[in-house]
Image (cartoon, rainbow, N blue to C red):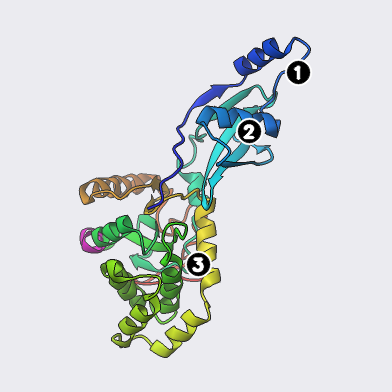
Amino acid sequence: MLRKLSLSFAAVCLGAYGQTQTATKGASSPTPSALDKATLEAYVRHMYVMDSRIGVQISDPKPDELPGFSEVTVRASMGLQSQDIVFHISKDGKKIVQGAVFDIGHNPFQADLDKLKTEGAPGMGTSGAPVAIVEFSDFECPYCKEEAKLLHDNLLTAYPTQVKLYFKEFPLDAVHPWAKRAAMAARCVQRQGLDAFWAYHDWIFAHQDQITPDNLRDQVMDWAKGQSQIDAMKLGECMENKLTEAEVDKTVAQGHDLAVNSTPTLFVNGRRIEKALDWPTLKSILDFEIEYQKTAHNAGDDCGCELKLNLPGQPAPKSTLGLPAQK
């Protein structure tokens, strides 16, 4: 499991820093501005003790929801690991605020809801349910294995009609050498049916400890031969020719856009959960959200509100399994 770079939320003021620099360099030196990328990089590196091993990229300022401020994203990276830090910078460049900005008239998780895309993702549960869970997972991640079992054992039993789960592959190939190929194989299996996908999902997590980069393909093909709903020859061709790599890359890009940095990461009606929870804790969140949506109607699977979840727009039969309809 890939852990995020350790960065905390804070509100910081650049004014005092500027005064100190002016006193040091002399009265004629200009006051530093956080809108200058070099100045902001030096300031952020000092704040978070980022040495030369950590790369820093700073975006151009863009309009901010916070009046009088611009939004700037700082990306800190080390190898394939990265984390985005959003700063709100005053128009004069003197003050920086780090933290989320909320609009009381909208769902507090609106920004992530607008980015969540479930079209084409394998789903489990009832279309139109008041709660939609989007799970970013890695087949080689041991914590994901635990969460997969927890969801399999409890979710549909406790919530046969109130929850819809969507699975998104997010292989952390910097630390898990066979995770991406397993995700590509999952997409190949999905092409042969949703039931086949969930059978693969359960099987590969159950046999996670027996799989290596060298034997992954053989293990998958041996499993497929015992599955009546799978054409093993088509599956082998799909895996051999990497026909689903672009699909997995697209899902990974969506995860990065949502600042997913670790697995498993769940979004429960947009609420980000970045670690595996025990069932009582997760259930309490689901119960709260189901009750809240009885009056809020501002999230869920195909809620009919202004969310951009890219979910089914037409009524669907009540079922326990089914892919989201294509728009």
- Residue placed most toward the observer, 21 or 314: 21
- Residue placed most toward the observer, 2 or 107: 2
Give the quarter of the image for residue 13: top right
Tell me the amino acid under the disc marked 1: Pro
Q: Nearer the viewer, mark 1 or mark 3?
A: 1
Tell me the amino acid under the disc marked 3: Val
| Disc on res. 248 | 3
Left/right of residue 206 with respect to residue 296 in the rendered view: left
Could you tell me how far apart the alpha carbons at marks 3 and 2 are, in whole angstroms? 32 Å
Tell me the amino acid under the disc marked 2: Glu
SS at badge 1: loop
Left/right of residue 71 with respect to residue 196 in the rendered view: right
Give the quarter of the image for residue 66: top right
Mark 1 Cα shell of 10 Å, populated few (<14), some (14-19), many (≥20): few
| Disc on res. 41 | 2
Residue displayed at 31% across by 58% down: 142
Residue displayed at 56% across by 37% down: 86
Give the quarter of the image for residue 31: top right
Could you tell me how far apart the alpha carbons at marks 2 and 1 are, in whole angstroms? 17 Å
Contact between labelled residues 2 and 3, with CB atoms less than 8 Å apart: no
Decide if residue 324 is in sight here. Answer: no
SS at badge 2: helix
Residue 326 spot, x, y in % from top left: 50, 71
Could you tell me how far apart the alpha carbons at marks 1 and 3 are, in whole angstroms? 48 Å
Does 184 sit above or below residue 261? below
| Disc on res. 30 | 1
Left/right of residue 2 with respect to residue 41 in the rendered view: left
Q: For the stretch drawn in magenta, what is the main secondary structure?
A: helix
Decide if residue 326 is in sight here. Answer: yes
